[in-house]
C-alpha cells in the first residue's frame, strides 16, 4: 500500500460525505473535525487529535465516505492508499497464495476483529458515531460537556491545545474542540462589537453538539496572555448576582499550572447553567474546591497583566464566588465578593471600559441586595442603590439591553424597599422607583420576555400602591390594579403558583385600598377573592408566614365590607319611608355638581378620617339619616 503525507490549512475539506475514496488517514499534527449531514444540517460527531486514525469506515463501506472530514487549524496527515479494489484496509501478506488474501471483501469484514462476537462489553467511549448521534448522551450524562472553538491569534491553536489538555485533568468534564464557523471563522479575530453575535453563534454550536458550555477567545498580538469568553447552552439569569453573560473575559497566562487550571475549571462551572439534576450536583460538588485553589492564582496575577486584564480577572473571581454563595447558600462569602468587585472597579474607569465598569457596578449592587436580604443588613440597600444607579447610567442599552433592564428593575426594587423602611415617606423617591420599572418594561416586553415583564409589572404595582395609599391618589391605585391584572395574564397558577399568588396578594391589597378610598363594595369583594386565592396557594405550599399575613388582610377587608353592607341595610330601611325618600331627592337636586367637595365643606368633621382602619360610621357626629346617605353617595 502506498503511503504519503499531506498538509491542510484551517477549514480545508479533507473529504466529503458521499465521495468515493480508498484512503485512510492518520493525524500527524493538528485537529480534524468529523461531521454528518442531517435534515437539520451538518452535525459534528467528534474532533480527532494527533495520533488518531480516520477514513476506515468509508473504505470498508465500498469506498464511499460516510462522514465529512475538515481541518481545524493547520493539519498534517499520513495517507495510506489501498488497492484499486478497496478490498483491504491493512497491508496484504507477502505471500500471494494466502487464503485470507483470496477471500472476498464481505468475507474479510465478516471475520474482522471489529465484527467478531465478543463477551467484552463495549465501553461508552467506543460507541459508534451513529449511537452517539441517536442517543445524544451529552444531555443525560452528569459530566459537564465543554466545547472549545480554536482561539484566534498566531498562538491560538497552541493555546487551544493547552486549555484542552488542562481541562482533561479536571474531574467530571468532557472536552471537545469544535470547528470555527460563523463569526468565529474571522481571520483577524473577533471584534469587541461582535461579541453579541458570537453569543448567538455559540448557542447554535452547543445545540448541534450537545454541549453545556462553549469557550472561545483569542491570544492578543503581544502573546503574553489569552482572553477567554464563556457561553452556557442555557442562558444565565441576568438578574442573578454573579451571572456570566458572554461579555465577561477571563485572562489567563500562556502556561497553566494547577492553580490556574483550577480557576479555569471553577469559572466554567460557575458560568454553566445545568440542564439536569445530575449536572447541577456535579457543579455543586466541584465548584467550591476549584475556586478555593483558583482564588490563589487570581489574587496574584502575572506582572505583565495590564489594568483591564486585572480588573476582568477580579470580576470573574467575584462572579464565581457569588455563584458558590448562591448555589451552596454560603452567604458569608458575599462580603468577599463585594470586596473583589470593588477592587476591580478601582482598576478601571467608565471612560476606559464602560461595559466592564457598568457590569461590575451592576453585580456589586446585586451582591449588596443579597447581603441585605441574607445577612440582615438593611444599610446595604443604600450601597446597592448607589452601585445600581451607576450601572444604569453607564451600561449601553443598545448593546446590553437585558442587562440594562435588569439593573433598572433591581434599582426600582431597592428604592421601593428603602422607602418602605423609611417612616418619612418620600414621593420623589417613590417616583424614581416607578421610572425605573417603566424603563425596564421598555426592554422586557410581554412578547419578548413575558415572565420578566410580568415580574416588573408586579413590582410597578407595589410601588404605585404605596403612592396611592399614602397620598390618597385613587388613580395610582387603579394603575396598580390594572398592572396586577395584566401580570396575571402571564403568571398562571398551574405554571408558577408562588409568583401567581404573590401577584394575587398585591392585587388584593390594591383593591382593598382602592375600595376604602372610593367606597366601592365591588372592589372590596374582588380584594377578598384575590386574597383567598393567594392564601390557598401559600397554605398549600407551606408558606406559613405569608399565609398569616394574608389571613390578617382578609380579616381587615371582611370587617370593612361588613360595615359597608350594614350601612346599606340601614339606608335601605330609611328610604322605605316615603317621606324620607322625597326629602332626599329634593336635597339631592339642590346639591352642586361637585358633591364630594360640598360634602367635605359642609358635613364632614375635618378632624375625622373615615378611611382609617378603626373606621366607624359618622352617625355619632351627624345624626341625620340624610347626611348618612349623602356620605355614602360621595364615596361612590
Image (spheres, helix red, strand yellow):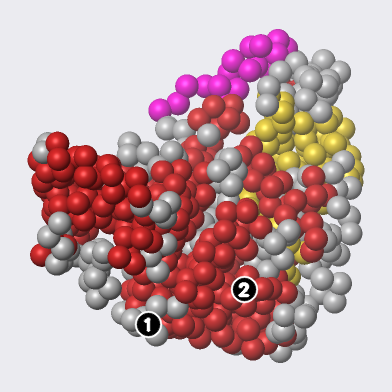
Residue 631 pos. (x, y %): 25, 55
Inspect the magenta stretch and tell me whether residue 388 lies in it.
no
Q: What element carries label 2?
A: helix
The answer to whether residue 280 of the structure is visible from this angle is no
Residue 577 pos. (x, y %): 11, 38
Which one is earlier in the sequence, the residue at label 1 or at label 2? 2
Q: 10 Å neighbourhood of mark 2: few (<14), some, or many (≥20)?
A: many
Relative to the observer, which residue lies in front, 207 or 246? 246
Relative horizontal placement of residue 220, taking residue 554 as reference (left or right): right
Looking at the image, is 534 positioned above or below residue 23? Answer: below
Q: 10 Å neighbourhood of mark 1: few (<14), some, or many (≥20)?
A: few
Q: Distance between the residues labelled 1 and 2?
A: 27 Å
Q: In which quarter of the image is residue 66?
A: top right
Relative horizontal placement of residue 66, taking residue 622 as reference (left or right): right
Residue 181 pos. (x, y %): 78, 45
Q: Which residue is drawn at 67% across and 43% down?
A: 205
The circle drawn on residue 534 is none
- Span colored in magenta: 99-119
Q: Is mark 1 on a helix, strand or loop?
A: loop
List the residue tagged with mark 1. 424
List the residue tagged with mark 2. 391
Relative to the observer, which residue lies in front, 274 or 554? 554
The answer to whether residue 601 of the structure is visible from this angle is yes
Relative horizontal placement of residue 478, taking residue 446 as reference (left or right): left
Q: Which residue is drawn at 63% across and 17% down?
A: 109
Q: Residue at x 77, y 31 (%)?
A: 68
Inspect the magenta stretch and tell me whether residue 101 lies in it.
yes
Q: Point out the frontmost of discs 1 and 2.
A: 1
Quadrant occupied by the N terminus: top right
Relative to the observer, which residue lies in front, 428 or 274? 428
Amino acid at each position: 500500500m502506498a503511503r504519503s503525507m499531506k498538509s491542510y490549512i484551517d477549514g480545508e475539506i479533507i473529504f466529503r460525505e458521499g465521495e468515493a475514496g480508498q484512503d485512510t488517514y492518520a493525524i500527524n499534527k493538528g485537529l480534524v473535525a468529523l461531521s454528518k449531514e442531517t435534515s437539520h444540517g451538518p452535525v459534528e460527531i467528534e474532533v480527532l487529535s494527533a495520533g488518531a486514525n480516520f477514513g476506515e469506515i468509508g473504505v470498508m463501506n465500498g469506498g464511499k465516505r460516510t462522514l465529512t472530514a475538515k481541518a481545524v487549524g493547520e493539519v498534517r496527515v499520513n495517507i495510506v492508499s489501498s488497492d484499486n479494489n478497496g478490498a483491504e484496509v491493512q497491508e496484504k501478506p507477502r505471500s500471494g497464495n494466502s487464503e485470507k488474501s483470496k477471500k472476498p471483501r464481505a468475507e474479510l469484514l465478516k471475520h474482522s476483529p471489529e465484527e467478531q462476537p465478543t463477551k467484552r462489553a463495549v465501553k461508552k467511549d467506543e460507541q459508534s458515531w451513529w449511537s452517539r448521534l441517536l442517543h445524544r448522551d451529552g444531555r443525560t450524562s452528569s459530566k459537564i460537556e465543554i466545547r472549545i472553538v480554536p482561539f484566534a491569534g498566531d498562538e491560538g491553536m497552541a493555546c487551544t491545545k493547552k486549555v484542552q489538555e488542562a481541562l482533561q485533568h479536571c474531574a467530571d468534564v468532557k472536552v471537545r474542540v469544535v470547528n470555527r464557523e460563523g463569526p468565529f471563522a474571522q481571520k483577524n479575530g473577533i471584534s469587541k462589537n461582535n461579541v453579541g453575535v458570537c453569543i448567538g453563534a455559540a448557542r447554535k454550536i452547543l445545540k448541534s453538539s450537545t454541549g453545556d458550555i462553549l469557550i472561545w477567545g483569542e491570544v492578543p498580538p503581544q502573546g503574553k496572555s489569552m482572553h477567554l469568553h464563556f457561553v452556557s447552552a442555557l442562558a444565565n439569569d441576568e438578574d442573578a448576582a454573579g451571572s456570566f453573560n458572554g461579555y465577561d473575559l477571563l485572562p489567563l497566562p500562556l502556561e497553566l499550572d494547577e492553580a490556574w487550571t483550577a480557576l479555569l475549571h471553577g469559572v466554567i462551572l460557575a458560568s454553566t447553567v445545568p440542564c439536569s439534576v445530575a449536572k447541577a450536583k456535579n457543579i455543586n460538588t466541584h465548584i467550591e474546591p476549584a475556586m478555593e485553589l483558583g482564588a490563589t492564582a487570581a489574587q496574584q496575577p502575572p506582572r505583565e497583566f495590564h489594568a483591564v486584564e486585572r480588573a476582568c480577572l477580579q470580576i470573574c473571581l467575584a462572579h464565581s464566588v457569588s455563584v458558590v454563595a448562591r448555589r451552596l447558600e454560603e452567604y458569608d462569602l458575599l462580603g468577599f465578593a463585594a470586596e473583589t468587585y470593588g477592587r476591580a472597579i478601582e482598576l478601571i474607569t467608565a471612560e476606559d471600559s464602560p461595559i466592564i465598569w457598568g457590569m461590575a457596578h451592576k453585580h456589586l449592587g446585586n451582591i449588596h441586595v443579597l447581603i441585605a436580604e441574607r445577612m440582615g443588613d438593611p444599610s446595604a440597600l443604600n450601597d446597592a442603590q448607589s452601585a445600581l444607579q451607576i450601572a444604569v447610567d453607564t451600561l449601553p442599552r443598545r448593546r446590553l439591553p437585558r442587562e440594562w433592564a435588569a439593573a433598572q428593575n433591581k434599582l426600582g426594587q431597592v428604592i421601593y424597599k428603602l422607602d418602605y423602611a423609611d417612616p418619612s415617606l418620600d414621593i420623589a423617591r417613590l417616583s424614581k422607583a416607578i421610572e425605573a420599572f417603566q424603563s425596564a418594561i421598555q426592554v422586557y416586553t410581554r412578547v419578548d420576555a413575558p415572565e420578566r415583564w410580568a415580574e416588573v409589572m408586579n413590582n410597578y404595582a407595589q410601588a404605585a400602591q404605596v403612592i396611592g395609599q399614602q397620598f390618597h391618589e385613587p388613580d395610582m391605585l387603579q394603575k396598580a390594579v390594572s398592572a396586577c391584572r395584566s401580570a396575571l395574564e402571564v403568571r398562571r397558577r398551574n405554571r408558577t403558583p408562588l409568583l401567581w399568588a404573590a401577584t394575587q396578594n398585591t392585587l388584593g391589597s390594591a383593591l382593598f385600598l382602592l375600595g376604602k378610598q372610593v367606597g366601592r363594595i365591588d372592589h372590596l369583594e374582588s380584594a377578598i377573592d384575590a386574597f383567598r386565592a393567594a392564601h390557598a396557594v401559600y397554605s398549600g405550599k407551606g408558606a406559613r408566614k405569608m399565609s398569616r399575613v394574608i389571613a390578617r388582610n382578609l380579616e381587615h377587608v371582611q370587617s370593612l365590607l361588613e360595615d359597608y353592607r350594614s350601612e346599606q341595610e340601614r339606608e335601605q330601611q330609611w328610604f322605605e319611608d316615603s317621606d324620607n325618600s322625597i326629602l332626599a331627592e329634593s336635597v339631592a337636586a339642590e346639591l352642586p355638581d361637585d358633591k364630594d367637595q360640598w360634602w367635605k365643606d359642609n358635613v364632614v368633621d375635618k378632624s375625622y378620617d373615615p378611611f382609617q382602619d378603626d373606621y366607624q360610621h359618622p352617625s355619632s357626629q351627624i345624626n341625620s339619616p340624610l347626611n348618612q346617605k349623602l356620605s355614602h353617595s360621595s364615596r361612590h
